[in-house]
Image: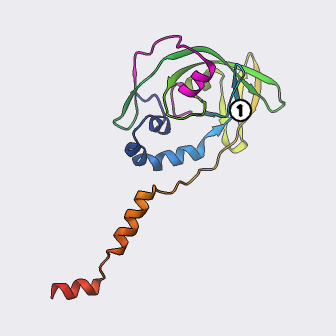
Amino acid sequence: MHLYSPPIRKMCLSRKAQEEESKESDKWLSSLQYLDAIINDLTISESFLDPDSEFGGINDSAIKALGWKADKPSNFAIKGNSKHITDSLGWYTDIPVTLKDKENKTVTVIGNFIRIDNGKTEPMLFFGMSNIRKVQGVPEPNKNQFRIKLHGKTYIIPTFSKALVVKDPPKEDQDQVSTDSSNLISEDDLKKKSV
């Protein structure tokens, strides 16, 4: 059951598993379309479209900030291309999410979201394909916009991309590399030792 895109699965994986999926995730992250979203009075700056995931999601930090309890318990596990399986932490149904269109008009879309624990401290929300289909959405990354149709009217929601941040390897990995490189033996030294 393919419910979440590789990076969303990655958010729930161990560090070692995260490193293994890093390349696939970087490609996905660079293609994300972010948008400004508000639930109640909470602005969620980490809001994005994820057409590779079937369901939309909201993380623990957002749920805690909103002070919500799950509407419905979840009774399924989320399994992606990796061997890692994570349990969904609850459903939140009929959530009003406020967006602003290009003319700065407020548009409220109603969606259902699954709660995930991605270990992030900043609130996060993503719209999966079920959310996108519900509003007859068409992501247009080349135009930095998300076109939706609601109650017979079309709205253009501005989107933007974020640059990838390249992280340095942990210090212990750097020390290991420098230690290993200081113990290198030249080809000539190897020939001398074998004679």
Q: Residue type at mark 1?
A: Asp
The quadrant the N terminus occupies is top left
Q: Is residue 87 visible?
A: yes
Name the one closer to the observer, 91 or 145: 91
What segment is highlighted magenta in the picture? Answer: 49-77
Residue 141 horizontal/vertical position (percent) = 67, 41
Residue 50 horizontal/vertical position (percent) = 57, 34
Q: Is residue 168 left or right of residue 152?
A: left
State the residue at coordinates (39%, 39%): 14
90 versus 189 height, above or below: above
In the current view of this chain or complex, which residue is farthest to the top? Answer: 71
Name the one closer to the observer, 195 or 143: 195
Q: How dense is the environment of label 1, judged by Cα within 10 Å: few (below 14), some, or many (20 and up)?
A: some
Q: Is residue 28 left or right of residue 161?
A: left
Q: Is residue 59 visible?
A: no
State the residue at coordinates (52%, 24%): 55
171 versus 71 height, above or below: below
The quadrant the C terminus occupies is bottom left
Residue 111 horizontal/vertical position (percent) = 61, 18
In the figure, residue 148 lies in which quadrant?
top right
State the residue at coordinates (71%, 41%): 144
Residue 189 horizontal/vertical position (percent) = 26, 85
Secondary structure beneath disc 1?
Answer: loop
Which residue, given by chain and number where applicable, does mark 1 sit on?
36
